[in-house]
Amino acid sequence: MQTAALLNPIETVDPEPRLLIVDDDPGIRELTAGFLAGHGYVVDVAEDAVAMRAALARNRYALIVLDVMMPGEDGLSVLRSLDRTTAPPVIILSVIGEDVDRIVGLEMGADDYLGKPANPRELLARIRSVLRRNRERPAPVEMLSAARQYLRFAGWRLDPLARQLYDPEDVIIHLSDGEFRLLLALVEHPRRVLTRDFLLDHSRGPNSENFDRAIDVQISRLRRKLQRPDRRGGDDLVRTVRNEGYMFTADVERR
């Protein structure tokens, strides 16, 4: 693991986000790291899964850019091993045309995906978008009043400020950033047919690739998380409207 750029230690400003680039190609690693460092990021690089885990043990990262095709343990295996409740957001890179890598990566909790070879400027835009979404956190607890409102449906409770979902037994159900944004879009537009393009824009941002299968994957993951024994299941709450999109079928109350 090498450090591609570091802030001047005498500076007193807050450090820029630290990124980790994981790719077995040394040329791509260094070119990508150099480009991102030139845009103000602190960038470390790792050549494989072993070096990546060593880097994660030493430093806290704002985001990981993870190549799928690596010798030994591949990127999808690495992604699967991460604790998505504590790990930084991940952008996966997959060979252009390998949609299966993108689908599986999304199922495992990746926050975004990009075809490889990646245009450095597009990668930079994706990184900024993911980091911006990750910064959209709730206000400090002391600023939240007792009158704070939840979105309630079929016994569930969604907290838009804390970005948390509570099941009917009041257990927190972990959602990735994309899953939260997708569920919020559905819950805020109940009993309306929402197109895949609409949901893609609201869950992954307007600059995302028009990749319909990505929404289908996210919907499938949401349905599994909304499935509870002996209660209305996720398939009932999110209905597929053939050739049109999806509809959230439950009544929603804001209180």
Image (cartoon, rainbow, N blue to C red):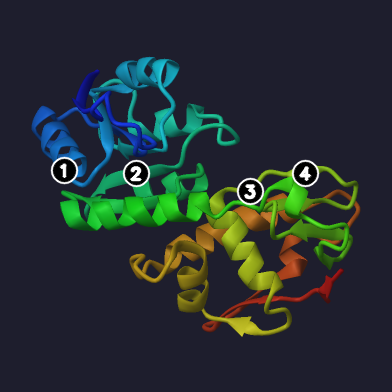
- Measured as percent of width and height from the top left, residue 66 is found at 32, 37
Task: Identify the mark nearer the N-term, 4 or 2.
Answer: 2
Task: Identify the mark nearer the N-term, 1 or 4.
Answer: 1
Amino acid type, residue under disc 1 in the picture = Gly
User: Which of labels 4 and 2 is toward the front?
Assistant: 4
In front of the other: 141 or 158: 141
- Secondary element at image label 1: loop
**For residue 119, which quarter of the picture?**
bottom left
Query: Which residue matches tag 1?
Result: 38
**Residue located 49% across and 32% down the image:** 80
Query: Which residue matches tag 2?
Result: 92
Specify whether 34 is left or right of 248: left
Measured Cα–Cα span from mark 2 to mark 3: 18 Å
Task: Identify the mark nearer the N-term, 1 or 2.
Answer: 1
Task: Identify the mark nearer the N-term, 3 or 1.
Answer: 1
Can residue 112 be seen in this snapshot? yes
Measured Cα–Cα span from mark 1 to mark 2: 21 Å
Measured Cα–Cα span from mark 3 to mark 4: 9 Å
Name the residue at the left extreme.
27
**Residue located 65% across and 66% down the image:** 184
Amino acid type, residue under disc 4 in the picture = Ile
* Mark 3 burial class by Cα count in 10 Å: few <14, some 14-19, many 20+: some
In front of the other: 135 or 254: 135
Specify whether 2 is left or right of 210: left
Query: Which residue matches tag 3?
Result: 175
Give the numbered dot on residue 71.
Answer: none
Query: Which residue matches tag 4?
Result: 172
Measured Cα–Cα span from mark 1 to mark 4: 40 Å
- Measured as percent of width and height from the top left, residue 2 is found at 21, 20
